[in-house]
Image (cartoon, helix red, strand yellow):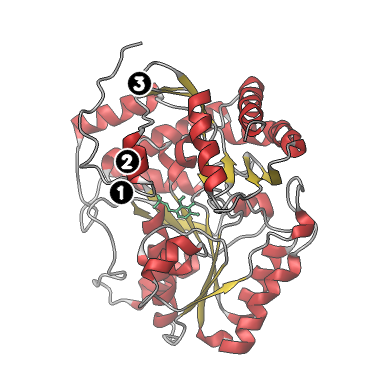
Amino acid sequence: MTQTALPGELEPFWMPFSPNREFKKEPRLIVRAEGMYLYAPDGRALIDASAGLFCVAAGHCRAEIADAVFRQLKTLDYAGSFLRTHPKAYELAGRITEYTPAPLNRVFFVNSGSEAVDTAMKMALLYHRVRGQAQRQIFISRERAYHGVNLGGVALGGMINNRRAFGTGLPVVYHMRHTALPENRMVKGQPERGAELADDLQRFCQLYGPENIAAVFVEPTAGSFGCLPPPKGYLDRLRRTCDDHGILLVFDEVICGWGRMGANFGAQAFGVTPDLMTMAKALTNGAQPMGAVAVRQSVYDAITEAAPEHGIEFFHGYTYSAHPVACAAALATIDIFAREGLIERARALSPYFIDAVHTLADLPCVHDIRSVGMLAAVELQPQATPGSRGHEAQKRLYDRGLHLKNTGDSLILAPPLVAERGHIDEIVGKLRAVLAEI
Ligand SMILES: Cc1ncc(COP(=O)(O)O)c(C=O)c1O
């Protein structure tokens, strides 16, 4: 393979969510990728156990996507979507609605998961306002949730390090308890116990008045914290309470969407239909930044019909909403999903993947393993500084040829959906070798 030149100067790039000083002393770079593998500067292959950051569902460097992007750049490199737009934006919205649950048939484009979350929050506020319920300003979310890094999403989030430095002036959010019950340790798939945790929403209704609550945001399976599948019946209970009180239910499907749960979205995997649904990541296979909010038609109608005939209905949007090149990448990605049956593949491979990951349960450093669909987390016993063991494991895994995302002491596995059984064996084998050492 061709050796890619390394940068001489590492200092100017302020890396996101990274210990910059440590990294720059001992950089671990990626210079190339193909299929299931990433490549280090010295040519070493690393199997990608987390699909990049949960986005590369169809495997790396797909020629079909690259060609579509190149063609689009030469045909129409940019057209904004304020007042003008381009055909691929309509085509893509239509294609997405073939995968979302039927009532969610309107699609708003953004550039990331974080933007999708904040967009959904604004939609919820506006929806209630145009229906004469502007007092609905409270949002409900959950401990251990991750809803991106924009200020709305930070307020919704339930991970302490992402919140503590930014805590003032954020929207009012009350957090339901997370669903990681000790009695569900090492359970494969959805736990039997814990549906009653959804009654936290009832308690908030009693305490703050349901007429003041705009929306409930949950990831169908909490992903970034480290795979917390919903207890059986939990999401149904949330849905019922929302219905009883006119509260919107929003599923943040940025990780769960596009096959990760073994169905189109978490909504279908768990049989509960939300009112709004965010997505990003696998929508373009990670090849272009793009996110979207899929919306129930009744919500769209309420908002659009409240505006004057020639008036703008939603004062919101981004310069790059529905960027033509991102649309081209997403359409090529969806073609691959359809042609290669990636969602069916994920569903079929899931039991093998889950069984394989749970074989690590015998290792002394493993505290818990959680899994559903093609997502799993191996949570390590914390050492004196929580997170240090996970960080150490993640670095050693790079050196041993395995890339994964860790959040604190949770090592998160979400391989591309094109993985074969042999790839799962390789991932679990390398993980076992490193975890046996630490
Ligand atoms: C559930 C969820 N929401 C939102 C986001 C934020 O997405 P992005 O990093 O594209 O802004 C993420 C990212 O991991 C996520 O997992």
Circle 3: residue type: Pro
- The tag on residue 411 is none
Q: In the image, is residue 337 above or below residue 368? A: above
* Res 207 → quadrant: bottom right
Q: In the image, is residue 82 above or below residue 428? A: below
The residue where tag 2 is placed is 326
Circle 2: residue type: Ala
Circle 1: residue type: Ala
Alpha carbons under labels 3 and 2: distance apart: 28 Å
Q: Position of residue 395 (x, y in %)?
A: 48, 34
Q: Tell me which residue sits at (45%, 36%) in the image.
A: 52
Q: Nearer the viewer, residue 416 or 87?
A: 416
Q: Position of residue 43 (x, y in %)?
A: 39, 16
Q: Is residue 401 visible?
A: no
The residue where tag 3 is placed is 41
Q: In the image, is residue 384 above or below residue 129? A: above
Lower position in the chain sequence, tag 3 or tag 2: 3
Q: Tell me which residue sits at (49%, 64%) in the image.
A: 160
Q: Is residue 92 visible?
A: yes
- Quadrant placement of the C terminus: top right
328 vs 139, left or right, is: left
Q: Position of residue 422 (x, y in %)?
A: 64, 20
The residue where tag 1 is placed is 322
Would you say the residues marked 3 and 2 are in contact, meaning their CB atoms lie under 8 Å apart? Answer: no
* Res 118 → quadrant: bottom left
Q: Nearer the viewer, residue 67 or 90?
A: 67
